[in-house]
Amino acid sequence: MGMNGHSQKTVLAPDSRKGANVRHAADLRRGETLRPFPKPQLAELMGATRDAGAAGFALAQIPAGKPVLWVQDRMCAEEMGRPYGQGLERFGADRHKLIAVCASDAAGVLWAMEEGLKCSALAAVIGEIWGDPAALDFTATKRLAMRSERTGIQVFLIRFAAGSSLSAARSRWRVTSSISAPHPYDPQAPGVPRWRAELFRARDSRPGLWEAGYDAKAHRLDLSSPLRDPALEEPPLRYSRAG
Amino acid sequence: MIHGVNAIAAKLGMKRGARVTDMRALVPAIRVEDAEEGEDEKDLARLSHWARRWCPWTRTDDSDGLLLDTTGSDHLWGGEEAMLDDMARAFAAAGLTIRAAVAPTTGAAWALARYAAKPRSMCTEDDLAEMLALLPVAALRIDARTVVLLERLGLKSVGAVADVPRAALVRRFRRDNALSANPVLRLDQAMGRLAEPLMAEEPPPLLRAMRRLAEPIGELESVRFVLAELTGDVVRRMQERGAGARRLRLTGFRVSGGVSTVEVATSRGSRETAHLTKLFDGKLETLDPGFGFEVMTLDVLVHEELDGIQKELTGEDVKDVELFCLIDRLNTRFGPAAVTRPVARGSHIPERAEILAPARAQDAAEPVMIGRKLQRPLRLLRQPEEVRVLYSLPDGPPAQFVWRRKTHRIDKSEGPERIAPEWWREKSTARLRDYYRIEDSEGRRYWIFRQGLPGDGRGGLPLWFIHGLDA
């Protein structure tokens, strides 16, 4: 499968979707749905420091209410904070089913992630690694990618302050927060979160840039072309085929 | 045969181990009572438990002594001297006279209690050498043969042994590995130069599987093989009892004497051979076989009731068990403090409302939350970090803040959500918190709060803190 260049609005959901779940039927008629993760695999999210957007982007794609293993190295825990269960519940997660691990270094994080992949009860594994540690090499990512595909557990490797080192991740994204949707009752308040998600390397779909939004009611991630500024309005395929 | 003598008899020259007829020949008037084999040990063990009134750690020491670790307990009795007084009084009330000593090391306490001139002695680290110097060499806890040897060498007191150049002593006793035959090691123990771990008496293990090995083993592979067999035994017996292991200890007994152990724990009772064996992965390397183990045991130290698990058609129960297995494996590598799950507590202060508690602990009852869902951030910083904020006095919303030396312009904000201090827990000067959910010009969302209000009488101008990052 691949992304159709003409699609302007695409819908992405982790579980099987029904027609009722899709918001923009008209858009779908024009294009097709994008499912970057047709089956569970390793996705690498390049997050920004001082920005928790990447974690939200990942949580929005994990089936709601399923057990999740969340591993951080010490630096991520200090700099970016620990997961907060009550906040997680806004993204459909069940905090009673979260296992939060703080490892001292990247090698520990990778070990814990691999252990998590042996446990079929988990719906997803989130690993956070700071910088470019030597332990996180191509082989390590390859192991995660292969195990993830074999066991059917989605893996998100979130990296902060990282260079673009070699990686065997099936898809690699750059995710940052972007201006939230307008709040329905209070124009001054932040609304539903949105993220700017750039897929810069993928094995089975084309790179592209999207505006991602989270629909809490349906627990669904919506991807749409990021063009808000009419001055920049150009055929959308420029972005979707930019890679 | 004489098993024991009282103080007066000892003065008359009666000796332990001598024949009754010989002693009768010396002093015809002695009174002889029949000894009851084993009763003394039992009495001493009972006394040892009774002595836990002074400190939580006691044990019997040889056949005639009690060892108490009073570190941190003496102040409860008003100091060491007062504690010794109280002990003497309590034992006297029980009809016993004691010789007691307080010293920084086990060896020194042993020596002073038995050989000091006074029935009660106290010794600090500074006068340790001085007090021990006067005692006879037998005070070093060495066997009779070594005592005779030292006396033949002209070394009659501990001080004399200590004065001999160390190299010469070490050379003389280099072949004596046993502690009781080596005065150098014993002296080091008494002086605190050599660690002497205290081994408490433990309740016997609930279940024990043992393998005596035809040949000593040392390789990891063989140990792993034996472990698998032992686990199989233990699991079979736990099945009969309907129990599951919570804590296991593998012990290897070395050919050369001494033991080496590893312990593992599970987050809930388990009797799956594969799981239990796997917990020892990476820990077996820490076993030190020396010249090889000749006996290995696997003890179940703690177990709990575990009924036969009905495997449901949906497989849900099986998955639960798998999750606990994962927690166990993570625990063995990272320690229980690093493997956590969020637990709600009865509080409104965010860092207290939910804490990351060890995942191993049994699920504690959570307080029932009534009311609307709170807008909480996805990530909470370990400590709120102070930020400099531009805002309109006295309590306007924030307009701009500087965090970690970078300026964020705030475009959207929602709040305040006021959380009052918990006066029953905090100091009276604790200030309220006004939380704001904010979004900066680049769309990054944060959770910041102002601590206090200007003029609330609890400090100067309020400070601002960033507490969470939100997706």
Image (cartoon, coloured by chain):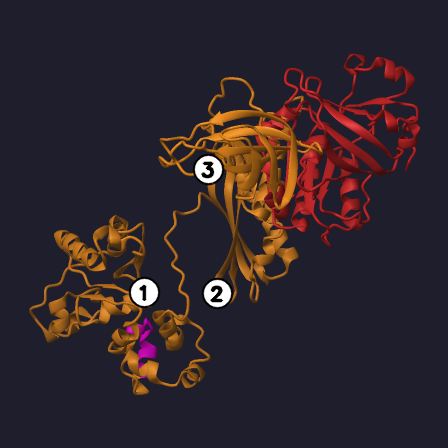
Chain colours: A red, B orange
Label 2 – label 1 distance at C-alpha: 28 Å
Does residue B231 appear to the left or right of A22 in the view shown?
left
Q: From which residue to which does the magenta span run?
A: B139-150
Of the residues tagged 1 and 3, which is closer to the observer? Answer: 3
Residue B281, compared with residue A41, is above or below; it is below
| Residue B240 visible at all | yes
N-terminal of the pair, mark 2 or mark 1, is 1
Mark 2 falls within which chain? B
On the rendered structure, is B222 left or right of A134?
left
Residue of label 3: B461
* Mark 2 or mark 3, earlier in chain: 2
Instruction: Tell me if B244 is positioned left or right of A143 in this view.
Output: left
- In the picture, residue A177 is in which quadrant? top right
Q: Which mark is residue B465?
A: none
Give the crowd class for mark 2: few <14, some 14-19, many >=20 residues within 10 Å: few
Q: Nearer the viewer, residue B396 or B271?
A: B396
Identify the residue at image location x=57%, y=63%.
Answer: B292
First along the sequence among labels 1 and 3: 1
Q: Evaluate whether residue B306 shows in this view.
A: no
Q: Which residue is mark 1?
A: B104
Instruction: State how many labels appear.
Output: 3
**To which quarter of the image does residue B149 belong?**
bottom left
- What's under tag 3, amino acid-wise? Leu
Pick the front one: B406 or B199? B406
**Residue B405 shown in magenta:** no
Residue farthest toward the top in the current orientation of the protein:
A20
The outermost residue toward the left is B29
Image point (53%, 43%), residue name: B336
Q: Main secondary structure of the magenta part?
A: helix
- Circle 2 residue: B257
